[in-house]
Image: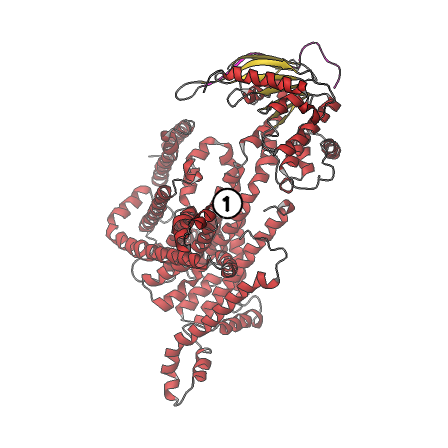
Amino acid sequence: MSAMTLSVVLIVLLALAVVSIRWLAALDERNPIGRFGTPLLFGVWVLVFWQLLVDGFDVPRVLLPAPSVIGHSLLVSLPVLAGDFTQTVLHSALIGLVAGCALGFVVGVLIDRSPFLQRGLLPLAALASAVPLIGIAPIMVMWFGFDWHSKAAVVVIMTFFPMLVNTLAGLAESGHMERDLMRSYGASTWRTLWSLRIPVALPFIFNALKINSTLAMIGAIVAEFFGSPVSGLGFRISTEAARLNMGLVWAAILVAALAGSVLYGVLGWLERRATFWHPSIRSGG
Amino acid sequence: MSSTTASPTVEVQGVSVVYPAKEHTVTALANVSLNIVEGEFISLIGPSGCGKTTLLRVIADLEQVSSGSVRVNGMSSRDARMARAYGYVFQAPALFPWRTVLANVCLPLEIHGIAKEQARQTAMQHLERVGLSGFEGKYPWQLSGGMQQRVSIARALGFEPKLLMMDEPFGALDEITRDRLNEQLLRLWEREKRTVVFVTHSIPEAVFLSSRIVVMSPRPGRIVDVIESGLPADRTLDIRDTPEFTAIAHRVRVALQDGHGGEH
Amino acid sequence: MAVSTEGKSLWWRFGPVITIVAVVLVLWYATAIGLNSAQVIERTLSSQPGWSALDLARLTLSMDRPVLPAPHQIALDLVDSVFGWPLASPRNLLYHAAVTSSATLLGFVMGTLLGAVLAVVIVHSRTLERSIFPWIIASQTVPVLAIAPIVIVILGSFGLTGLFPKAIISMYLCFFPVAVALVKGLRSPGVMELELLHTYAASASHTFWKLRVPASLPFLFPSLRVGIAAGLVGAIVGELPTGAQAGLGARLLTGSYYGNTVQIWSALVMSALLGLVLTGAVAVAERALTPGGRK
């Protein structure tokens, strides 16, 4: 269609979009249609305008492919992307996440009894959060090879410190009264840990888990920019971008985005089940 | 603080406040009428849910009435608020932690557009009146609860409103601090003769401070009794042990029980 | 961590960190000897009869391309690079640090401004808050850095290379934490404080500048720290896809291509130092702008 017609259509649709979004947004706070519908509708309209603008104004594929093109690439390359997903998300990110968090948790529990070690490690943890740990990727490749093991190692290093810091903070959170209560029962250190201090620490631990899930995905993908075998989401993105195969690049990014949000969502769900008693969850989080 | 006019400072006429809720509506105030005369210290006392705080907030234009009218200084409550006719003290100090004590007291003056230097001088005077000279450079978290609440009162004196409204200002403090602050507040009121509307759920506090005590009861919120206090003007805390004090406190207690009348 | 440090001796304060660092160094040297020994034995010592442990130690700690360089090797390489070459030379790590940090800082400034503007708009518009803000929060769960290659390629096709694309990536990474934290901070004042201003008949502008903005600062500063650290990562990653010639990320990449481990570690240490300087600057700014030493 001509530029004139297209512009008119766009303006009409824009008006429609604004009206519909404003209407939904004005609905009462607690109404789930309003709460979930408004951002969803916003997203739908974005897709609509994206498609129309790219198609209508013939935007070059290199710049921005239309949603339909991305969807098509996704379907066509599903097997390839599934392999990438397994490599990056299931192997590098998840295994690294589990290992790094477990390590951080265990070390946290162990040094909980030693204020000396805490005073030594916590400043280092603060330093680590300021430092681009992702730079360790090429070294891990040298030590562990190009496959997912080196990427998982990067993830372990990135997720260790946030979990350590949060475990310690969580363990410190149980109050004096409650600990005295356990002492009056003659409970051993491990029993107190298990029945009191770890449950109290759970909100902090989940906080770290959620932060770490994002770090794990980033670490796994970006570490592949430094060199990877023939599969992996990061690998796919960088090589296909170099070949200007943008449809596939965006499809890979979409897979990564979905994986990241799903992982975060699962952790959020687990958190609500495990820490239902905490005020922040009770008041609606 | 010029001479009085014939009409009362605050006129509440047939005010009702009704909240629509899921199962049944909540009537916070049912057809309440009250006149408050200039210069008097009037307490609103009653159990939770009796509407005393709601009544205060309605006068302060912090809440809307469902029916009835409120007039403050002859104006609607909203106009009175826009004309900054009163000072309001909340249950908690509500001080801004990033401002010093002095800067906190200056806040209403700044908003009112008063020049900085003049605002500082006025604020220093207010702090002196509540006995906090020397603390102007401190930050709120460096002060005790009682001192913070005193700063909050100094701030409420801000642009010298004729009407002071206080919502259980000493409720969170320990009894000893509370006694001291009660005495200070009484002295302040005697010196300056502002109109004070004071919400409390402590009978001794109401009897000690007020010239009139309004007893309220809940479900629905309404006034049960209004008791004139005949206590002498320059009273001290010792008056709490006298028979006159005990008699008034007894009247208040009876009124409270009547209002609660076999309920709950 | 909330223990007061008043009246505590220097040993109490610095002893633990020094101990841990010392232990790490000892372990590092031991590991270096261990990891490098295979190569050393194979190449050099097998042809020398009767070599001692001391020989092994000496040789493993001074290899050209070790599996794990010794700390002193890295330190020497850093010193040599920084002081042995003019600042504008690509052999000087400070040159690369400057390239990366300029992209980081530009991105940081742009991202913070953008995040602040968006936060202010969101706080004042219910429509935008309910339609866009959920996406901004959700986007934090998405590995945003995966977009880096696309940004580089797209901007490259416009002829924009070098500093700008990297700054765009950094900006993107700074923007999210700042926007989310500022929205939370601007909305943090409670009902009581808002009603207080209501009793002063304060205008919306008064409420914004005298209440919301000061109340949002404790939320803003930690997010600035996170933002600038993320921006640095973004700038480094931005140097990877097209194999840039300058910058710390480029040095890491070339080091790994040529197997030059010492170069990799030097670039890594320099990146770490840069990260510390940048976040330290934000911490200093925070202390300067927070009245009365309030936490």
Where C58 falls versus C230 (above or below)?
Answer: below
Magenta-colored stretch includes residue B168:
no
- The answer to whether B249 appears left or right of B118 in the picture is left
Q: Is residue B224 above or below residue A138?
A: above
Residue A54 figure quarter: top left
Percent across and percent down for residue C56 are: 43, 82
- Residue with the mark numbered 1: C178
- Identity of the residue furthest to the bottom in this view: C49
Q: Is residue C6 above or below residue A66?
A: below
Q: Is residue B102 left or right of residue C246?
A: right
Q: Residue furthest top?
A: B6
Number of disc labels: 1
Q: What amino acid type should be assigned to the residue bearing mark 1?
A: Val
Find residue A41 and report its horizontal and vertical position in percent: 36, 33
Q: Which residues are magenta?
A: B1-19
Label 1 sits on a secondary structure element that is helix
